[in-house]
Image (cartoon, rainbow, N blue to C red):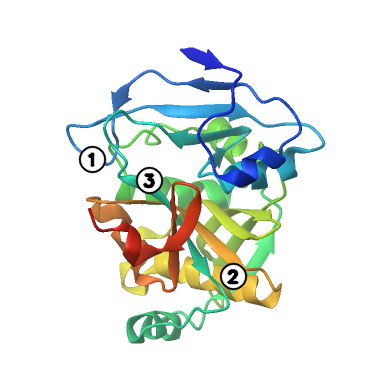
């Protein structure tokens, strides 16, 4: 593992950080999204009283959160992973997105503390087994799931969608930052594929962000060539982090 105390390549706002941050990089490992490619991540641990501020600054530089770790890809010879966000004020749903919202109008949104429950774990297990049975989270036990939900040094909520009977249908572990909402991990009932629940969760985030006068909903990485990530491009206006700037998504996908 390589370790550095120098500032990594980031957007200009990273210079607002007043505390020296130590970064490390992972060893090369197979990419979970693109066959035949290798992945390496730059990461740092975030904790303490200024965790929210540091999280915001690093997120603007393309970092994502997993528990108390912030990371971003630094894969050799590959820049397929690109941070994307939706500009809330300009969002206008397409006909397809309006259909998804109408189909899920019976679901009720709840914003809850990110705590463990058996109901949440059962839904998570059903989602993993139905959608990602061969992935790295396939063996996640109750303790690991609890840590995923509850280990957060920043402002975090669990956004839930429940039906009229109160059954949990979908959930998203979501961070609250000064500029918007950032989805960390979402899971939903794979037996209800017709609802397009992954898309509906993002629509609910947009509604919550608009109600709170927040500017953006951060979607994590859009990965060129990955079918699993293609749905993120359906939300417009979408912005992508390109070097030191957030630019319109269309301008970044050429060449």
Local SS, label 2: loop
Local SS, label 1: loop
Foreground label between 1 and 3: 1
Tell me if mark 1 has few (under 14), some (14-19) or many (20+) residues whose alpha carbon lies within 10 angstroms of its own: some
Residue at point 72%, 49% (across, down): 155
94 vs 62, nearest the viewer: 62
Residue at point 67%, 68% (across, down): 214
Tell me if mark 3 has few (under 14), some (14-19) or many (20+) residues whose alpha carbon lies within 10 angstroms of its own: many
For marks 2 and 3, the one nearer the N-term is 3
Whether residue 99 is visible: yes
Foreground label between 2 and 1: 1
Whether residue 152 is visible: no
For marks 1 and 3, the one nearer the N-term is 1
Residue 228 location, x and y as percent? 29, 53
Give the total of numbered labels: 3
Tell me if mark 2 has few (under 14), some (14-19) or many (20+) residues whose alpha carbon lies within 10 angstroms of its own: few
Dot label at residue 34: 1
Contact between labelled residues 3 and 2, with CB atoms less than 8 Å apart: no
Residue 13 location, x and y as percent? 63, 46
Dot label at residue 166: 2
Q: CA distance from mark 2 to mark 3?
A: 22 Å
Q: Quadrant of residue 215?
A: bottom right
Question: Residue under circle 3?
Answer: 128
């Amino acid at each position: 593992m390589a370790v550095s105390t120098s500032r990594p390549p980031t957007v200009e706002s990273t210079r607002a950080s007043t505390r020296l941050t130590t970064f490390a990089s992972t060893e090369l490992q197979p990419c979970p999204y693109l066959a035949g490619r290798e992945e390496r991540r730059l990461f740092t641990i975030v904790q303490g009283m200024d965790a929210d501020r540091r999280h915001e600054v690093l997120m603007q530089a393309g970092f994502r959160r997993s528990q108390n770790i912030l990371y971003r890809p630094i894969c050799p010879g590959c820049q397929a992973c690109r941070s994307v966000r939706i500009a809330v004020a300009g969002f206008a749903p397409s006909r397809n997105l309006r259909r998804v919202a109408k189909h899920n109008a019976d679901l009720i949104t709840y914003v809850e503390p990110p705590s463990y429950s058996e109901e949440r774990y059962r839904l998570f297990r059903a989602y993993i087994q139905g959608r990602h049975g061969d992935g790295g989270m396939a063996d996640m036990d109750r303790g690991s799931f609890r840590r995923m939900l509850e280990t957060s040094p920043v402002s975090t909520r669990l956004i839930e969608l429940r039906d009229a009977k109160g059954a949990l249908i979908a959930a998203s572990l979501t961070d609250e930052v000064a500029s918007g909402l950032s989805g960390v991990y979402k899971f939903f009932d794979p037996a209800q594929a017709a609802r397009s629940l992954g898309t509906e969760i993002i629509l609910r985030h947009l509604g919550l962000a608009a109600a709170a006068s927040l500017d953006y909903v951060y979607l994590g990485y859009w990965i060129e060539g990955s079918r699993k990530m293609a749905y993120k491009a359906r939300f417009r206006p979408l912005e992508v982090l390109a070097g030191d700037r957030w630019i319109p998504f269309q301008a970044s996908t050429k060449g």
